[in-house]
Every structure is written in C-alpha cells, then in structure tokens.
Amino acid sequence: MSSPHRSPMASIEQQRTNPDVRLSVEQVSYAYAPNPSQAPLFTLEAMSFQAKPGEIVAVLGPNASGKSTVLKLISGALEPLSGRILLNGFVTHLLPTKTRAQRIALVQQESQLLFPSRAWEFVLQGRHPYSSGLRFESDDDVTIATNALAQVGATHLSNRWMDKISGGEKQRVILARALAQQPLLLLLDEPTLHLDIGAQVDLLDSLRRLAAENRYSVVIVTHELNLAAEYADQVVLMQKGKCLRVGPPASVLQRELLEQVFQAPLSVEMTASGRPRVTLFSNT
Amino acid sequence: MRPLTLPRLLLRCSILAALLFVVVVIALKLGAVQVSLYGLGRDLIHVLLGQSSAISSDYGMIVVDIRLPRILLGIVVGASLSVAGASFQALLRNPLADPYVLGVSSGAAVGAILALIVESHLDLTPELAGLITPLGAFLGAAITIAAVYLLGRRDGQIDSSTLLLGGIITASFLSAVIIFLMSTLRGSNLRGTVFWLMGDLSTPQPRSLLYFLLFGFLVAAGVIYTTASDLNLLLAGENEAMHLGVDVPRVRIVVYLAASILTGMAVSVSGAIGYVGLLVPHLMRLIFGSDHRMLLPASALGGAIVLVIADTLARTVVAPSELSVGAVTALVGAPLFIYLLRRRLA
Amino acid sequence: MQRFYSTLIRLAAVTVAVLFLLSLELSGQAVAPAPLVPTQPATREIVDEVGRTIRIPVSPSRIVSLAPSLTETVYALRLQDHLVGDTDYCDYPPEAKKKPKVGGAINPSLEEIAALHPDLVLVTKSLNRLDTVRALDNLGIPSYATDPHTVDEIISSTSKLAEVLGAPEAGKSLAAELRNHLAVLQAKLASVPPQRVLFIVWTEPLISVGKNTFIADALGKAGAISIVDSSQDWPQMSLEEVVHLQPEYLVFASSHSEAAARDFDTLANRPGWRILDAVHNRHYAVISDAVNRPAPRIVSAIEELARQLHPAVFQEVPQPMEKELPAGATKPPSASPAFSLSLQDGCKGSTESSCAR
C-alpha cells in the first residue's frame, strides 16, 4: 500500500508512472465568497489524493470540514481555484456535461421528486447521458437499468412508486440509477445519514461488492468513523477546510489525531481483520 | 418495465387527435343555429370542388364562416396554453404554476389597453385596425417576458425561485396598472376591455393571423419538445439533472422563452382564459404520467379538446346570449382543481 | 401484429392530418365575397355617423338592431315591420320584447344575427363593441353606426336613420315634432335661471355623467346644468367635491318612482350626504330612464325633468305631448298622469317649491 504522506510532486509522478490510477485530485483548493469584494466565507486548502479502480475512498471529517465541497469539485459542479482533478487523465470540470455524466455518477441522500414516478422510470433516468436529442430508451437501456436494480437487490421494487418506499429502499434505487449511468467513478454524499443500521450495512456491503466486481472507484463523504474504518481502502481526514492526512484506515484513524479533529474522547483498537475500530466515550 | 416508445406515443396521440376530431364535429353541429351533418358534409364537398356559390344550405355559411374559425382558434389557444402551463410547472418546479404566473398575461393586457387607447387617436384602415389589439398585446407580453427574465436572474442565470418571485411581483404591478388604465377608458372601450380580460374567443380573427398563430405554436411547442427528456430530469432536482447530463441553464432559458411566447400569442388574441393552462397538464399527468415526451403532446391535444368544449358550452348554454369562455373554464375548473388537490393530499 | 399496429397508426395519423388541413382550408375558402343575403337589385353607398362608408340596399327590409335606443327609434319611425331581430334588453315599446332576440348588446350571437339574414344591422358607438362591427364586416353584413352626443344630434341622427332606412318623410316629421317640442320648452324656460343639479348614475361609488354626454346636454335643455365638469363619460365624483359645489337638486333616472324615493331616503341617511342642501331640503327629481337612451323618448324625459325643476313656469295642467309615438303604442310612463301622481307621493313632507302641484 502507499505511504501515508505524499508530496505533491510524488503524486503527479505516480500518475504518470502508474496508469492504474483513475482519479487524481492534485493540489486542489477552493474559496467561496458570495460577494467578490468581501473576504471568502469558506476556503479549502490545497489537497491531493488518488483513487484506483475498485478502491473505496472515505472523505472523513466533522461538519463544515469541507467534505461536501470536495465532492462537488470532483463531480465538476464547482471549479477549483487552483489545482486540477483528473479522471483517467481528463480534467473533470472541462468535460461536456453529458460526457461527464457518463463517467461520474453522484448519489445524493434524498431525491425530491415533484411528481412521483415509479422506481424503474427513476432508474432509467440514469441512461439520459447516453441519449441525444429526442431519443426513446432502447432495449439495451432497459437491460442495463434492470441489471442495475438487480445489482442493488431492488428488483422487487421495480414497479413501486418512489414516494411510497422506505428510506433504505429509496437509497438503493438512487444507487441503481447511478449504476445505470455505467460510470467510472461513484460519488456518495453522506449516504448513510437517514438509514437505519441494517440498511447502512447493506448499502456499504453492496458498494464494496460492486466496486470489486465492476471496478468502480468510489468516493464516500461521511462522518461515521467506524464505517470509514470498516469499508474504506483509503481515508482522507479533513478539518475546517484542511486535509490533515491521507492513507489507509489504520494509519489515519489514530487516537490523538481523531480526538483533535472530532473533539471527543475515544479509543482505537485493531480488530482481527486488520482494520481499526473506534469507540467513543462520554465526556463525564 | 415499459418505457415510452415511439409507436406507443403515436398511438396515444392519435387517440387524442381522434377525440379532438369528434369534439370538433359536435361543436360544429351545436350552436344557435342547428345544422345537419349531412348538409354540412354536402357543403364541404361543394367547397372542395370550388363551388362556393352552390352551397345549398344557408346555414352552411354560418358554420364555415363563423363556427369553424372560432373552433380552430380554440384549438390553437387551448393547445398553446396547456403546453405553456406544463412547461412552467416543470421549469418552476411548482404544480401550481400556470401560464400567467410570470405576468405575461398582465403585460399583454396592458399592451392591449394601450393599443385600444392609441387606436382611437389614429386613422387606420380596417385590416390594420383589426390587428392593432393583438399586436399591442403581444408587444406588452414581449416586454414583460424580457423584464421578468432580467428580474429572475441570479449570478447571470435564471433561478427558478427568483424567477417565480419576479414574475409574481410583475404581475401584481401590472394588474394595478390595468385597473388604473381602465378607469380612464371611455364607455365602449371599457366594456370591450372587460370582455377581453375575461377571455373571449368570439371575435373572429383574420385568417392570416390564425395561420401565423398555428405556425408559431408548432415552432415554440416543437422547441420545448426537444427538451422533453431534460424536463423529466429537472423534475427530480436541478442538481441531479446536471449530474445526469442536463445543460440546466440552457434548458431553463429555452423553455422560459418558448413557453412565454406561446402564452403571449394565445393571450394576444383571446385574452386571459384561466384554468386551462393549470389543469389540463395535471389531468394528462393523471392519465399518462409525468414523462414530458408524452405529456407535452397530450397537453396540447387535451387543451384543444377542453377549450373547444368550454367554448361550445359558452355559446350554447344561455343562447342567444353568450357567456365568456373564461367564465366557463373558471366555473368548471375551480371545483375540478379542488378535487385534484384533495386527491393529491389523500 | 406489430406491423398491423404500426400501419394502423400511420393510417390514423395521415387521416387526422388530412382532415385537419381540410378544415383549415375550408375556413380559408372565404365565403367572404358570397353575401349571406340574395343581392338586392338596388344598393347605394352612404357614410355613417362614425365616418364609415357602407353599401346598403336602398330600402332595407330586414333590419337587426343591436341597441335598445335604436330599437325605440325604429318603432318611433313606424318601421317596426322591417325589424327582424333585436337585443335581450330592447324592452320599449313592449312589443319590442316579442321580436327575435340575438343576445346582449355587447355580446350578441353572430350566428343568430346571421341566421336572420339581415340586410342592415344598426349599432351605436357608445354601446356596441368595435369587434362586433368588424365581425359583421367579415361576414359581409353591413352595419350602420350612430354616435349622437347631444340632444340635437339625437334628433338629427333619427332623421338620418330614417333616410337610411328608406323612410325620409317619417324621419322629417318626427324630427320636426321633436324640435318643436323642445323649442316650446326652451321658450318657457328662457325666463328662469337653470338649476344646478347632480345627475346620479350610481351611489357607491358616486358616479355621475360627463359634460360631453348627451345626458348632460339633455339636462341643459331641461333648465338644469350639471355641476360635473369632466370629460370622462362616467366620472367618479368625490362626496367632498359635491358638497363644495352644493347642487340645488339631485336627479335620479328610474323606471319606478317609488324605488327612487326609497333610494333617496337611504342616501339621505348616510353620513356626509346630510351636509348637502339638496338632501336637507329633499330637493330631488326623478325622471324616466328614457334619459339614458339616445332615442326620441328623451325629449319627454327632458320635459318631465323641467316640470320638476321649474314648476312655476308650467302653469297649466301637465299634458306632455305624446306625438312622438305612433298610435297604438302605449304611452311612456313619464307621460301618464298616474306617474305624475306618484311623483307627488314621493314629494310628501317636502317643501312646496320642489314638487309639481
């Protein structure tokens, strides 16, 4: 595995020499100011990390640490102030919208549907990046959508109305839509937020399996320490717009660092599988 | 899983078109003067053969010269308003949106009233005089479209909620202007304006204007139709739509302009007929679902059907007098809207 | 099966398209030149009162009237046999109610009008819509528009109309009678100063008549002068302004004098109105609503008002001339003695000078 601390030059070198790298975030920074004459409200300091095909990267940190901003930058919704983000060598925010949608799929927490639709209609929307003009879905599209539902174990939900299924079921359908896009990169923004524990485990197990089977690169934004510990191949630890450390869970999830970032007493143990487990204590 | 396919789309549209045809035939038959279908058919053949003067039935003239243009106007206006309504509902992500929510009809009304005032001071030929009110209305609508667009921008792009707010404020302001202008109007102008504001299909328009309206409708509705799949995705949320490959700013401005132009054209000739643009899309959604590739043509045909029926009722229910068609759509539309609302909440 | 459906769909689409184009074509096949009536052997061109040039038969035999005032005029000219249709509101004389109806004055049914095959339609600018006139033009039905703004214009409009309708003699004699009547009235009123009046059209909000209306002119001929100096037709007045101007009389137009008396009492009890001298002294006059219509009957309404405002000038027993109506028509309510009596009822409790003896 790679070393915990990488210098900027090393990562670019590695990209050139390592064609295996799919996603490369290189010295990306960002600043948000509602009014150009005012000081920025929020800044993201230069950070870098990489993801390989089949890897799950967890962007971990407390609220307002800049995790969602990182995701938006990777998805191309925002343009970095400096640095660049490469997907298979292409700068993401310079790609045309449709092409980008064919390579990057974003899974958001909730979908606010104005008029309810059925799950299969919803998943078919994932094929939109491959349509041009006034196209009707082809048999291939239908096959891909059906497969996507099967891959997340939601085939039985196919005919159900989106506003009548549970949160966990909805999350699965949303994931199926992302899979229908046949992306290279899957981005998930706090996917476990509204799910109960069983559903959380289900989702992450599926993600791990899908990443391995279909060679997706997956970037998950979360503040759940143990989920990151258990499922991530790499963790990017963030606090207040700064990336503090990048590396495998064992080297990032260390007690002093975590206590400083999350401002809570905790202890870290290693489990038999080689992954850390974090236990939180009460303050009293 | 049965997605919409082209044959299914065409089949459903053909059914609606056939229904429209039946409604048109019935509308041709009903009216202050009774008409027999056989006589009508015979007259049509005579006209086809170029023997206009040989039309035996006196009443055939009435049908061809008075009723048919009125029905055709109803078709174009009904289709325009419904497509505009469906588009605004998607664009503003608001099921209560109708074609007038962004102030286009108020702008058209101000334009029409000003045209009326100006006309009395000018000496125009009859043909020109007949066109000045629709022209003034359309000009008023166009200016309003531009103004609301400028108001509705944020960071240089149209933003749905800002657009809605800008439109509502503009509509309010223009309504006040209308009331002020109306207080300055002289007798018969005032009455004519009130009629126009209520919505009125009874004024025969020059044939060239009808053709122009039809052409405009086909172009504008066609443009909106090219964004049909994009609109489907917009309904799920603008962010999601963008991540699924929709060029959201482009779609917004295209749909805004095209739908506003449709509304402006319809209102210019028929005043502000209410409830059609709001309810027909909802009805079509109930029957055919929210896929805009089906919803847009269905709304067009459905709107035509509904307005022809409403207009026929307006001119037959209290014969020989006429109700204004806007009154009929309101009387039927309001209870129907309440019913739909309760259904949604249930 | 698939082939069958797609063929069916294509066939349906083509049929619908063809039918639609056909119907468009039909509406275009303007029957415009073909008139709705068999062409009269003799026609002529005339110019109506708004300046339009129209071509009409020399003696129109099928007339449709789109205004109550025009219907009244047609009856006054004894041409009612040629009247084949009028509006729902044409109620004077009572026989007019029995004529075939074409709808309202503002929204008549074009179909009904066309079904009557008129060779001339009568309209008036102050009531009818321009859209209606244009629609009739499109159908090839000529329409003649009147537009009188003063009482004199009403009289000359009547004789012009008679000439257009092919009965110039009837028009001349009617006009002469009316002018004569007015002249007698003017002679009597020459010796007294005009009363300042407020003509009340509506009370909430307070609406009166503008100086350019024929009603204002009629008031002038009745020995009154409207205190409203506005160029709008139906100006809204503020009560303050009326109080400032202090009219001597309030004038109401009503077909029922008892109702008018009630209206006056209601008004008198409202705050602000009591400040008016006219209310305080119960100086109000009620005249027949004939004053609202620019028709021959307005002359008798004028006389009726004059009698109420200047009773001293009318020494003899009230006998208003009834010559403006043909024999056989009922007398207008304003001329009947019964009505004058009820006027006196309404005058109970008021000072002598305000009521007819």
Image (cartoon, helix red, strand yellow):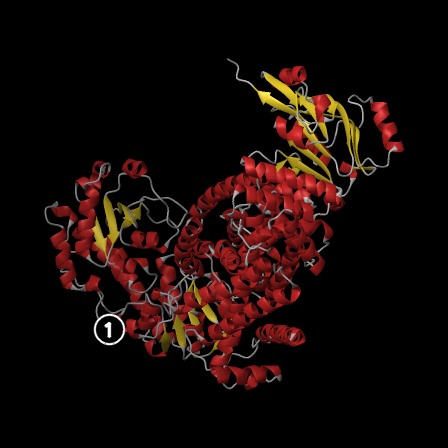
Q: Which is nearer the eye, A21 or C227? A: A21
Q: Which residue is mark 1?
A: C329
Q: Is residue A61 at all visible to an observer of this figure?
A: no
Q: Position of residue B267 (x, y in %)?
A: 53, 55
Query: Tag 1, which chain?
Result: C
- What's the residue type where badge 1 is placed? Ala
Location of residue C30 with respect to A237 vertically, above or below: below
Quadrant of residue C318 in the image?
A: bottom left
Q: Position of residue B294 (x, y in %)?
A: 59, 60
Badge 1 marks a residue whose secondary structure is loop
Looking at the rendered image, the quarter that the N terminus of chain A falls into is: top right
Label 1 neighbour load within 10 Å: few <14, some 14-19, many 20+: few
Q: Is residue B317 at all visible to an observer of this figure?
A: yes
Q: Position of residue A69 (x, y in %)?
A: 67, 29
Q: Which is nearer the eye, A265 or B98? A: A265
Taking the image as shown, residue A126 lies to the left or right of residue A158, namely right
Q: Position of residue A262 (x, y in %)?
A: 61, 19
Total numbered labels: 1
Location of residue C207 with respect to A27 vertically, above or below: below
Taking the image as shown, residue B207 lies to the left or right of residue C287, namely right
Location of residue B7 with respect to A179 vertically, above or below: below
Q: Residue at x 87, y 33 (%)?
A: A18
Taking the image as shown, residue B62 lies to the left or right of residue C237, namely right
Q: Residue at x 34, y 65 (%)?
A: C68
Residue ranking furthest to the left: C349
Q: Which is nearer the eye, C215 or B225? A: B225
